[in-house]
Image (cartoon, grey):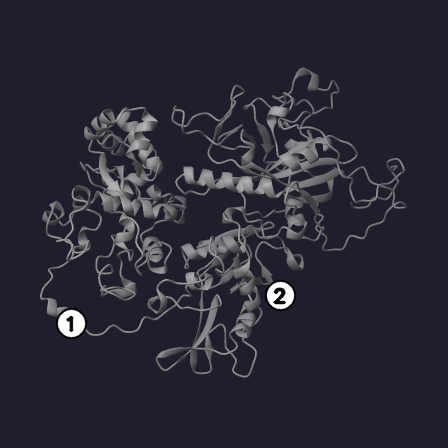
Amino acid sequence: MAEAAIITMICAHNGSMKFDDLRSIFGLNDEDMDSVLSRSACFAVAVMNGQKTVIARTEARLCRAQNCPGCPNLHLCKWHLLGSCRFAKGRRGCRFSHDLLSDQNEPVLTAHGLNTLDIKHLCILLLQSDSLLPAVCYSYNNGAGQYGRCPDAENCKRLHICEKYLRGSCDCTRAHDFYEPHPLQTLQDRGVPSELMPIMKDLYSNIEALKPRFRNKPSAQNPRRGPDAQNPRRGPDAQNPRRGPDAQNRRPSSGFRGQEAQRPPQSPIEKTEICMYFIKGSCKHGDSCYKEHSSAPYKWQIKEGSEWKALPANEVIEKDYCDPKRIYSTGISQIHFDTMTQGPHSVRRLSTVSSVVQPTFILTTEWLWYWEDENGIWIPYATAEAGHSLSSISSAELEQKYQADSSAVVEFTAGSQTYSLSFQDMIQENKRYSTKKVVRRRPKFVSAADVRTIKTTKRTFNSLKALPDHWDKALTPETGYKRVSLPSTAREYIRISELFNRTMRGFSVLKIDRIQNRALWEVFQWQKDCMKKSSRGRDVSEKQLFHGTDRKHVDAISLNNFDWRICGTHGTAYGKGSYFARDAKYSHSYAQDCGARSMFVCRVLVGDYTTGHSDYLRPPSKDGGDTVFYDSCVNDLHDPSIFVVFEKHQIYPEYLIEYRDSSVCEPVATVRTHVPAHSSVRYATSYASSSLSAASSSSHAYPPPSSYVSPFSSSSQVSSSSSSYVSPFSSSSQVSSSSFSSTSHVQASTPPKSAKSECIIC
C-alpha cells in the first residue's frame, strides 16, 4: 500500500518529485524511503537540476491492436487516456475500451501495482513510460540553423526541442518552448490536448532522466566532444532499438569527418513569425534568431522574386485588415485580403503568436471572430449587436479551438438556435434551417502609439492579477470597491439579465451593477492559479452562480467577500460554507423584499466537487489522506444545482442585480418609459452566453408548489401560511451590516397601482 500511495503522489506531481519532499510527506527517514523505492520497479532515482529526484515509471503498455486475446498489455483507448475521445460521442461509439476495470485491464493494472491509480494519474505514468509522445529529434539537436541537421525540416514528425533544456538550464538558440510552432504542431498531431501542454516540459524532462546513460552516469562526458556527443551504441538501449520513447531516433554511424564539409550550404531561414523577445526589448540571438525582428507586432511583406520585402504603410494596411468588412486595402496598389495578393505578387502578414497561446507576453496578437448578418453587418461573437442573440462562444474561445485544430468544426448556440462553424471553410451554418453565413478572423488593431504605451507601461508582476479588460479602470480604486452601473444596452447587462430571467419570470430587473474590487479580484486569480497548479495544469472549473441576500449585507460582501463564519445557521445541509445556486429562483427567497431585492452573480471556483454533508467544515479528502481534498460540495453529484464553498478566495462577487416583482408597478402618471422594439427586456427564456459554465435549468415558473419546505430551514423559518415557500438554497454568508446605495430609478410616492393602472417596464 505504501508503494501505491507513493506512485499516486508522484503522478499527482507530474511524474516526479524531489526525494526530500516525498520522504517528508510520508514521514520516512532516508533509509526507509530508499528501501521502499528499491523494492519496486515503478521508481527510478535520478539527479535532476542538482537534486535527488524520484521518477515514476512502469512496464505496462497500451496494446496497439483492437482485439488481442491473451495480451499482457492494456486494452484502453488512447484518446480516452489523454482526456477526451471524440468517437465516444458518436452514434457507434468508440471501438476501444474506456473501462479501467474491464476483464482485460484490471488484472494488468493489478499485476503492475497500478490498480489504485485513476485515469489522470495513469495518463501521466504511461506518457513518460510508453512511446505515446513523439520522440525528441536527434538531428535537430545537432548542427546550426533553424532545423539543425534534420533532413525533414518542418515536416519532421519528431519533436524539435532542445535536449539540453530538458536536462536543465540552457541558453542556446534551439527551441525552449513547447508552444513554438513546430513542437506544438507535432504534439497536436499526436493527439496531445491543450490541457496537457503546460506539463510537457516536466514529462519530457522525466523521459530524458529515465534514459540509462543519463541516470547511471550523469557526469560521464568527454570534455573534448561535449555533452551531446555520447556514443549511441553504448548501453542497453543500443541492444534493443525498440526500447524507449526515442529509440527510433538513434544517431547513425559517424562516418568520415570530412563528409560534413561536403554538405551543400543551407538555404536562408524563412522567418514566418515575429520574435516576442525582440518586440519586448531585446533578443539574445540577434541576427541568428529564426524569427523576424520587428518593432511592431505585425509586418506586411510582398514577394518579389524569391525574396520577401517589407511593404510601405505597414500600419495603414494593418488598420484596414483589422476592419472585418474590408476585402481590399486602401491606396493605389490595393491588397486583396482574401487572396493575400497585390496584383500578380503574393503578400503575407507576419505577426506575433496568438494571445491565447502565450497569454503572459506583451504585444501578442489578439484575434477577433466575426460573422456577417443579412444586412452585411459584421457581428463579433458573444455580442448582441444589431439586435442579434448572444452566441454561447466568444472570440477567445473560438481562437483557442482554432489553435488546437484549424480544421475542426465547432458547434455553439445563440438564442434557441444551434450553429456549426467550419474553420476550413470559415462558414457558419444554422443546424435547423441550413442557412449559411460568412465568418472572418481578423486581429485587433494596435497602433505604433499603442505599442510604445504598452512597452513603457509598468506591468503587474503577476499577469494573472491584471484587471479584466471590460472594467472601467478609471473607476477602480486601489483599496475598497466601486459599483459601476451598467447601461441596459451593454453586453454585460443583457447577458446577466438573460441568465437571471431563465428561472425568474414575472420579475423585472431594475439595475445591474458591476463590482470592481481590485483586492478581491487579485486574490481570486491567485487562488485560481494555485488550484490549476495543484491539478497538474488542468483548467479549473469555474461557474457563474447566484446568491440572494439582505440589502443591508451588500456593501460588506462587496468589500470583504463572503464569510460564512459570520453568518447565522442557514445552509448547513451540505456543509458549513457559503451557498450558491445555479438557478436564480433558488436564491430568490433569501433576497429580502424591501421594495427591491438584491442578488449577487458570482464567479465561483467549484473545481472538483463531491456530495456535501451537514457535518463538513471543509470538503472531504479525495484519497482518505490529509493532503488532497475536493474543492467544493454539491447537493447532487450528477445534476448539481447548489454549490457549497468553504474558502472565500474561491469566490468573486462580480455583479449585483436589483429587481422586484413585475406586478408591483407605478402608475403611468408618475413615470413613463419608452421601450424600443429591440429592448433587451425579454419574458421568454433565452440563451445567456458566458465563457464560464452555467448549467441549464428547469423551465417551470417560479415559485414551486406551496407545500415545499427547505431542508435547510429551522421550524421558525417555515411560514404558517399555506402559500409560503422556503427555498432549498440558503444565504450562508451574512456579514456585518452597512448602508446600501439607493437605486437610480424614480420611485413612485403613490401606493401600488390599482387593477386599472397602466404598467410600464422598469
Q: Is residue 593 above or below residue 358?
A: above
The residue positioned 30% from the left and 59% from the top of the image is 172
Give the side of residue 402 with respect to residue 155, left or right: right
User: Residue 18 location in percent, x, y?
Assistant: 30, 36
The residue positioned 66% from the left and 37% from the top of the image is 558
Q: CA distance from mark 1 to mark 2?
A: 61 Å
- Quadrant where the N terminus is found in the figure: top left
Q: Earlier in the sequence, mark 1 or mark 2?
A: 1
Which residue position is annotated with label 2?
377
Between label 1 and label 2, give the one nearer the viewer. 1
User: Residue 9 location in percent, x, y?
Assistant: 33, 32
- Quadrant where the C terminus is found in the figure: top right
- Can residue 582 be seen? yes
User: Residue 654 location in percent, x, y?
Assistant: 62, 42
Give the side of residue 755 with respect to residue 478, left or right: right
What label does residue 656 carry, if any?
none
- Can residue 695 be seen? no
Q: Is residue 272 above or below residue 68?
A: below
Which residue position is annotated with label 1?
261
The residue positioned 64% from the left and 20% from the top of the image is 713
Q: Disc 1 vs disc 2: Cβ atoms closer than 8 Å?
A: no
Q: Amino acid at mark 2?
A: Ile
